[in-house]
């Protein structure tokens, strides 16, 4: 191991979660205490903060206050959805990043995000190597979508899963309060992978979950689904359906596009913006059955409900950020920190494992096909066994006057020494 | 006090809350231990359970299991939205109720619900008195709407308020994660009274709440609101607006009707069914500003999110059910149990107080006019002082495998002795 002394930059990217700040705090706290790291800078709004020279000095924050980051949802440093161009096509951004790295003597870069962010890490790493600038670049995963390659699960997923399973249990009780008929459609996030929607199966495991669960991994046949809904409704007078926002028919068309003339709005990464599926399906089912139907969209709440976070997730997320800094200080670069699961005496254990950024970037991990039930409208015990250890532990989120106490950063601008 | 020996029936009515089962459990537990009460029956689906002779024997439930009722959302005995006709117009239902009371020797009737339920209590009480059937009838309040006459606050309100304030704080952080513009509209329940929407002001009190809060107590002028939204958005790049589902313009027209051709659907009590306001306003604001706008409807979650209940609310709700039984056994009838607030050495204390059913029935309590700020788009310190003590205390909801453990009743059918 060769020692590399210099400053570090930590940034956050992509959609926020209830646990990304725990990871970032894990990295910040560890970096502040590491002898090789001379200064710890936070990039405001991810890589855009680097490009815009918009850095804050993390050593200026009160250390007790900083600890509140661990339980604060969203991205305390701000996020972005900025995709770097290929350096072969246009290396302007990379030159600028190198300039900033040189300005602040940055030798460590930690980027906390999803697969697009791992792609960003990978490209920067390659560029720095090519230009002979010594630095160590590590990706710290986060995504409620749980779709990153390699790692057993992603920081942030379990907290969203716990919230979704809890809310579905509560909806289960609420939706059967009257002796009159009622059909409920719950729309859950997830473009291409159904991990979040699958979490509603944890409520089924408790006997208080949806009747039908539809993920994007399986083709969605509206007519076949209607037949099932009608049969369940006829038998029980109630039916709860959990659907991923990204369910598609066999021709690859989003169900949410059936009713809505989506204006083809795209987000920064070129993904189609989805939404309104619950209300479309609710209207459709109502028109077919005449039943009372309610559409519920869990919306932003599923990714920011820190009050219902999994303490296991918070602790693991923190450890991912911590490990990234420790590995980098030990000479590792160009990797994503991830998780590997093992069982000791039947007890779940989460170990840190490193993954190649190249492998992670832009690869999506879907739910294994044999984790679905035979009728592809639910998850089987393989998913339950996978997910249950992740949602254990109630959050230690500090409260003040009956409400959460979230972090308040001073955000003192970094100055070149 | 004259002793009255006989059975009791306990029923639940109206929309469920996170705390109604705590009240019902308070009544059941107290009744099971009271010497004057020979049998404790639960009416399935409220007064319909009485009319249909659909009663369960609460003594057949395991007492440890029954305790889970305290933390279970929704209505464990089932609810209804059945409005009794005036006995002068049609006394069929009342005669049937008397028949059932006689069949099971029922001398106590406890009804847990909102103002419509207090009306039901009142009518039954008058009919029994007129027909010389001695029995004691007590109303136990519940409503997230907090709109019952007399009582300082209603069981169930504080838990919904705590969830709303917490969620709004979390949305506040999520909605400002990117450095791009964003306007968020959050739709909160409340037909005629803005108590639930007002709870979002608790998030403002923490410095992490919506910019604008609109309740049905004030006329909603869409053009004037747009001017404010545009100014805030121009200044901050973000704007969060909390609206009651029931906001109306100066002509009394619901804003939710502006865009939607509501099919004039009415619920069992003749109220118009509202909804879709958030998406209407989001579309409207988007069309006027060109900004990215997200509409969020808290939907059912706000009334069933037991995982975020106020322990103060749970304890007070339990005590309301308990007091109803104790007062009735002591000879009181024809009253609603409610709360009166006092302060001892500056510390909030909640005392039980009795109210006339006649006064409570069908009266709605709105937010006092001087609790709003001057611009009628927020609440002032009077509301904060009122609401803050109510949301204190984290729920002791038992967890099993990382998820809530809700009650599982056997529901053993009552038999005539």
Image (cartoon, coloured by chain):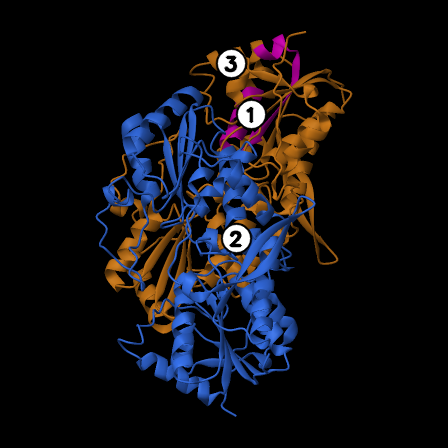
Chain colours: A orange, B blue
Q: Horizontal and vertical percent for residue A320? A: 66, 36
- Subunit that carries the residue with mark 3: A
- Looking at the rendered image, the quarter that the N terminus of chain B falls into is bottom right
- Is residue A249 in view? no
The answer to whether marks 2 and 1 mark residues whose Cβ atoms lie closer than 8 Å is no
- Position of B375 with respect to A413 (left or right) is left
Please rate how many residues cluster around mark 3, counting C-alpha atoms within 10 Å: few if below 14, some from 14 to 19, many from 20. some
Report the magenta residues as a range.
Answer: A100-125
Measure the alpha-carbon separation of dots 2 and 1.
Answer: 57 Å
Q: Secondary structure at mark 1?
A: helix
| x 48%, y 29%: residue | B176
The residue that disc 1 covers is A121
Residue A105 found in image quarter: top right
The residue that disc 2 covers is B152
Discs 3 and 1 carry the same chain letter? yes
Q: Secondary structure at mark 3?
A: loop
Residue A284 found in image quarter: bottom left
Q: Residue furthest front?
A: B1
- Position of A51 with respect to B285 (left or right) is right
**Magenta-colored stretch includes residue A204:** no
Q: Secondary structure at mark 2?
A: loop
Closest to the camera, between mark 3 and mark 1, is 3
Residue A227 found in image quarter: bottom left
- Subunit that carries the residue with mark 2: B
Q: Horizontal and vertical percent for residue A121? A: 56, 25
- Subunit that carries the residue with mark 1: A
Question: Which label was assigned to residue A52?
Answer: 3
């Amino acid at each position: 191991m060769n020692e590399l002394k210099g400053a570090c930059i930590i940034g956050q990217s992509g959609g926020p979660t209830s646990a990304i700040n725990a990871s970032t705090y894990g990295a910040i706290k560890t970096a502040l205490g590491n002898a090789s790291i001379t200064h710890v800078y936070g990039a405001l709004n991810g890589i855009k903060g680097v490009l815009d020279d918009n850095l804050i000095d993390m050593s200026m924050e009160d250390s007790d206050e900083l600890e509140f980051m661990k339980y604060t949802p969203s991205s305390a440093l701000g996020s972005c959805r900025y995709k770097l161009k290929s350096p072969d096509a246009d290396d302007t951004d990379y030159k600028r990043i190198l300039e900033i790295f040189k300005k602040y003597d940055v030798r460590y870069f930690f980027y906390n995000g999803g697969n697009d962010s791992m792609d960003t890490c990978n490209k920067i790493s390659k560029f720095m190597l090519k230009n002979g600038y010594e630095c160590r670049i590590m990706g710290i995963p986060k995504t409620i979508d749980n779709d990153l390659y390699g790692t057993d699960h992603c920081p942030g997923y379990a907290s969203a899963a716990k919230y979704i399973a809890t809310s579905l249990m509560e909806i289960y009780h609420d939706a059967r309060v009257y002796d009159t008929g009622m059909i409920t459609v719950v729309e859950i996030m997830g473009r291409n992978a159904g991990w979040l929607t699958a979490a509603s199966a944890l409520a089924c495991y408790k006997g208080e979950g949806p009747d039908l669960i539809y993920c994007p991994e399986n083709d969605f046949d509206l007519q076949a689904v209607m037949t099932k809904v009608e049969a369940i409704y006829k038998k029980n007078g109630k039916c709860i359906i959990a659907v991923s926002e990204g369910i598609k028919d066999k021709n690859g068309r989003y169900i949410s596009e059936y009713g809505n003339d989506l204006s083809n709005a795209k987000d920064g990464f070129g993904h189609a913006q989805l939404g309104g599926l619950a209300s479309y399906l609710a209207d459709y089912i109502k028109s077919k059955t005449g039943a009372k139907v309610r559409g519920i969209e869990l919306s932003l709440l599923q990714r920011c409900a820190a009050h219902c976070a999994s303490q296991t997730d918070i602790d693991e997320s923190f450890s991912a950020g911590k490990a990234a800094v420790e590995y980098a200080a030990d000479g590792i670069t160009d990797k994503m920190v991830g998780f590997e699961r093992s069982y000791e005496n039947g007890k779940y254990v989460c170990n840190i494992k490193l993954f190649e950024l190249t492998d992670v970037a832009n690869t999506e991990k879907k739910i294994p096909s044999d984790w679905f039930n035979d009728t592809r409208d639910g998850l089987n015990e393989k998913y339950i066994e996978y997910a249950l250890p992740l949602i254990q532990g109630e959050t230690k989120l500090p409260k003040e006057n009956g409400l959460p106490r979230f972090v308040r950063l001073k955000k003192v601008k970094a100055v070149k020494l």
